């Protein structure tokens, strides 16, 4: 009888100890959500078409691309009635021109359903009010900024809450915590 | 147990949560971020079970992440979304079982990791007690350890345990009894 009581008391203490919280990684929630977000992204050809793609353009090429997009949009509009599904993916075309230090870098972004877009990055202290982008016809947004030489992380902030980045572009280390940024390297000014 | 067998989940593991059902509905309808609400709620609730089943933080974190991702993948097949918590535990239990089985193929024996606690006046004694519990728990056969933890630590009744593990109630009672006898003997001697 006494042995049974001793065993019960021992098991009570065991249970009490095992019910204590265990200190796992405090970032585990974020890791789980990163894995879940990765599962939710479409794959294959559909994914390629829905993914944001970056291209590097000179300012001249960026201007030509603008004209091309506007011209193609006008031609298509004359032939067919636009369908809402065509803008299902709100962020599709992004361009950041390459530049030497001191020269403006042009950022071009396609977000037809956005009401405001801001360029945020390490070069402006991630201030969402410092570099609002200008809305252009066709859902395009544009800004030119002078970025000092060096490596910079940046993203686009849409309507003050959605971050956009390129899944194929170089990423910053913050990726695992749910907010990835892209990397821009501006070389020293040529002599 | 398949991820879609949630139609028969036990009541007390959650008498059912309308909050869970609402979150599940949002996720199924495309709001991936709503899954974060389920992660925040259930990660802490189940991390203790994963940790004691697997014996170390790294494996426990992997099991939790994997269970959540599997749950996310199978969410559309969840017939009782208000029972998400019970369903998730069945996935996690299955994952822990598989992980321990795989590890047993490679490891000679279960080597539990003992978590360092904060410094207290009797920290050394507390640490020694935790080590003894972890070692004894590690010596239990997998099925007995699972049954003991679910019944005595997670406080599931036998009907609930049967739903989570897929085992019969009489078998579960026998596993719990054997686990209690073993732990009681081992740890009464240790103390």
Image (cartoon, coloured by chain):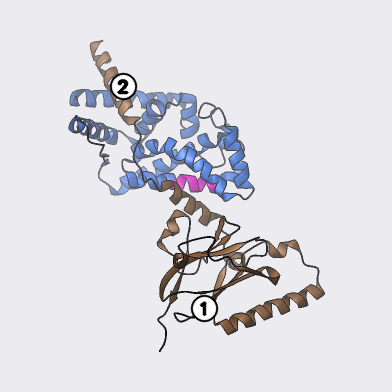
Q: Judge the density around disc 1: few (<14), some (14-19), many (≥20) Cα neighbours within 10 Å.
A: some
Q: Colour of chain B?
A: blue
Nearest the viewer among B23 and A40 is B23
User: Which residue is depicted at the point 31% across and 45% down?
Assistant: B104
Residue named by callout 2: A12
- Give me the chain that's brown: A
Give how far across and how far down residue B45 sits, in percent.
Answer: 44, 35
Q: Earlier in the sequence, mark 2 or mark 1?
A: 2
Residue indicated by mark 1: A104
Q: Which residues are magenta?
A: B65-73
Q: Which residue is rendered at x = 24% and y = 23% of the image?
A: B185
* Residue B51, percent from left and from top: 35, 39
User: Is residue A131 something one can see in this rendering?
Assistant: yes
Which part of the image, by quadrant, shows the C terminus of chain A? bottom left
- Disc marking residue B58: none
Q: Secondary structure at mark 2?
A: helix
Pick the residue in front: A127 or B59.
A127
Identify the image quadrant of the N terminus of chain A: top left
Q: Chain of mark 2?
A: A
- Position of residue A152 measured from the top left corner of the image (x, y, whole percent): 43, 69
| Nearer-the-camera pick, A106 or A55 | A106
């Amino acid at each position: 009888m006494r042995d049974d009581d001793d065993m019960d008391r021992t098991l009570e203490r065991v249970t009490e100890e095992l019910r204590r919280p265990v200190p796992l990684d405090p970032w585990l929630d974020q890791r789980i959500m990163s894995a879940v977000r990765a599962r939710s992204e479409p794959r294959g050809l559909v994914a390629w078409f829905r993914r944001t793609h970056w291209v590097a353009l000179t300012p001249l090429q960026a201007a030509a691309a603008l004209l091309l997009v506007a011209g193609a949009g006008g031609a298509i509009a004359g032939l067919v009635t636009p369908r809402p599904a065509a803008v299902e993916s709100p962020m599709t075309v992004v361009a950041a021109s390459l530049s030497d230090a001191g020269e403006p870098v042009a950022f071009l972004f396609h977000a037809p359903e956005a009401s405001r877009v801001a360029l945020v990055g390490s070069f402006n202290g991630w201030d969402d009010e410092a570099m609002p982008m200008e809305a252009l016809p066709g859902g395009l947004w544009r800004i030119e900024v002078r970025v000092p030489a060096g490596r910079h992380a940046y993203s686009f902030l849409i309507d003050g809450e959605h971050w956009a980045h390129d899944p194929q572009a170089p990423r910053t280390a913050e990726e695992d915590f749910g907010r990835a940024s892209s990397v821009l390297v501006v070389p020293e000014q040529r002599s | 147990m398949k991820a879609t067998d949630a139609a028969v989940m036990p009541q007390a593991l959650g008498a059912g949560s309308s909050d869970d059902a609402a979150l599940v509905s949002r996720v199924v309808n495309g709001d991936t971020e709503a899954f974060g609400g389920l992660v925040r709620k259930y990660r802490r609730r189940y991390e203790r079970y994963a940790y004691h089943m697997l014996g170390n933080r790294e494996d426990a974190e992997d099991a939790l992440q994997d269970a959540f991702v599997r749950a996310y993948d199978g969410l559309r097949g969840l017939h009782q979304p208000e029972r998400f918590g019970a369903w998730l535990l069945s996935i996690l239990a299955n994952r822990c079982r598989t992980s321990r089985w795989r590890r047993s193929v490679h490891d000679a024996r279960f080597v539990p990791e003992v978590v360092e606690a904060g410094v207290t006046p009797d920290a050394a004694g507390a640490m020694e007690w935790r080590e003894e519990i972890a070692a004894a728990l590690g010596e239990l056969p997998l099925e007995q350890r699972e049954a003991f933890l679910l019944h005595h630590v997670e406080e599931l009744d036998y009907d609930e345990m049967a739903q989570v593990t897929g085992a019969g109630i009489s078998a579960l009672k026998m596993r719990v009894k054997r686990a209690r006898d073993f732990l009681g003997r081992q740890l009464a001697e240790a103390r």
